[in-house]
Each structure stands twice: as C-alpha cells, then as structure tokens.
C-alpha cells in the first residue's frame, strides 16, 4: 500500500521529470531544469514578452491614429474601447514584470523551483504558467490562506 504522502512525492517527481505532451512546445527531455530546458523556457518567456510589447506598440499606434469623434455617442464608444484596452495593457504590464523576474530566475538558477518549498514546480505547470514561482501544493496553501483571511 502506498501512503498518501509518498504517492504525492512520487507524482511530483514523475511530473518534474517527464517531458511535456504538448507537441507545439516540446520540452527537451533530461534532468529537471537542465541547460536545454532552461534555454527552452527562456525562449518561451522571451517570445511571450516580445508579443506583449508588440501588442502594446500596436495599441499605442491605434490610439495615436484615432481621430476625435464629433458625435458624443461615437466619442463615448471610442473612449470605452480605449478604457478596456488600458485595463488589458495594465494586466499585460504586470505580466511583463513577472516575465522579467522569471528570466532573472533562469539566469540565477532558481527557475522551476518552488520559492517556498524548494521542490520542483513541474514541467506541465511551467508550460501552463511559465512565470509560476510556487509548486501546486504551495500555491493551493496560499489560496486557502487568502480565502480564510477575506471578510
């Protein structure tokens, strides 16, 4: 019989060592966070950063090229559209900061390891959220604590 804690440890080690099953992003096999895997995630993060920066440039160009609408209804519609764009860009700005932090962790060798427990975050989780700093278990604990402290 496998105890729950040993089974969880086994699942974590299997998750950490198996390559991703997504053919679009084939993670190089090998030891967890090998140089090839770090290079893979560096490229993934840099591509995401570049796409976000291009999106921000595109929004800025679109706003500069938009003429002021003489009709108040049209102007309100344009302003509402820009307001939505600003909210999206603000979220992307925050994501850019997380991407830069993740790239820094790749450089200093801490990328892919849980900031709380020191255990592997796992390839599937990093593919789903390349900026993750916590393993699933630590993230769940943080979310439970947050819910417990909310009014």
Image (spheres, rainbow, N blue to C red):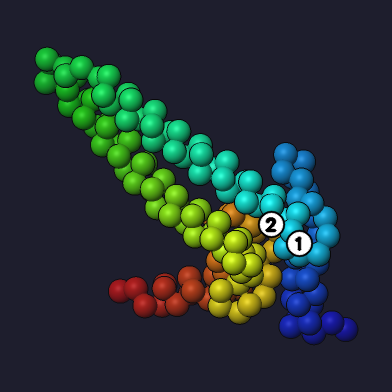
Secondary structure beneath dot 1 equals loop
The location of residue 142, given as percent across then percent down, is 49, 74
Residue 106 visible in the displayed image? yes
The location of residue 39, given as percent across then percent down, is 69, 52
Left or right of 96, for residue 23: right
**Along the viewing direction, whichever of 133 and 140 lies nearer the viewer:** 133
The quarter of the picture where the C terminus appears is: bottom left
Q: Residue furthest right?
A: 1
Residue 128 visible in the displayed image? no
Identify residue for label 2. 38
The location of residue 30, given as percent across then percent down, is 83, 60
Left or right of 39, for residue 99: left
Q: Which mark is residue 62?
A: none
Identify residue for label 1. 34
- Asked if residue 137 is positioned above or below residue 90 in the image, the reply reads below
**Along the viewing direction, whichever of 119 and 35 lies nearer the viewer:** 35
**Cα distance between the residues tagged 2 and 1:** 6 Å
Left or right of 23, for residue 114: left
Left or right of 13, for residue 71: left
- Residue at 56% of width from left, 45% of height from top? 46
Secondary structure beneath dot 2 equals helix
- Asked if residue 22 is positioned above or below residue 82 in the image, the reply reads below
Give the crowd class for mark 2: few <14, some 14-19, many >=20 residues within 10 Å.
many
- Residue at 21% of width from left, 30% of height from top? 79
Label 2 close to label 1 by CB (< 8 Å): yes
């Amino acid at each position: 019989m496998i105890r729950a804690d040993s089974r969880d440890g086994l699942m974590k080690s299997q998750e950490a060592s198996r390559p991703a099953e997504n053919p679009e992003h084939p993670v190089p096999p090998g030891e967890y966070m090998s140089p090839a895997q770090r290079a893979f995630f560096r490229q993934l993060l840099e591509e995401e950063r570049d796409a976000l920066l291009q999106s921000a440039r595109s929004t800025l160009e679109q706003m500069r090229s938009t003429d002021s609408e003489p009709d108040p209804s049209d102007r309100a519609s344009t302003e509402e559209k820009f307001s939505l764009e600003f909210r999206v860009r603000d979220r992307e700005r925050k994501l850019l900061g997380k991407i830069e932090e993740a790239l820094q962790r790749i450089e200093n060798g801490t990328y892919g390891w849980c900031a709380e427990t020191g255990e592997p975050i796992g390839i599937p989780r990093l593919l789903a959220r390349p900026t993750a700093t916590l393993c699933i278990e630590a993230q769940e604990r943080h979310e439970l604590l947050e819910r417990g402290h909310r009014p």
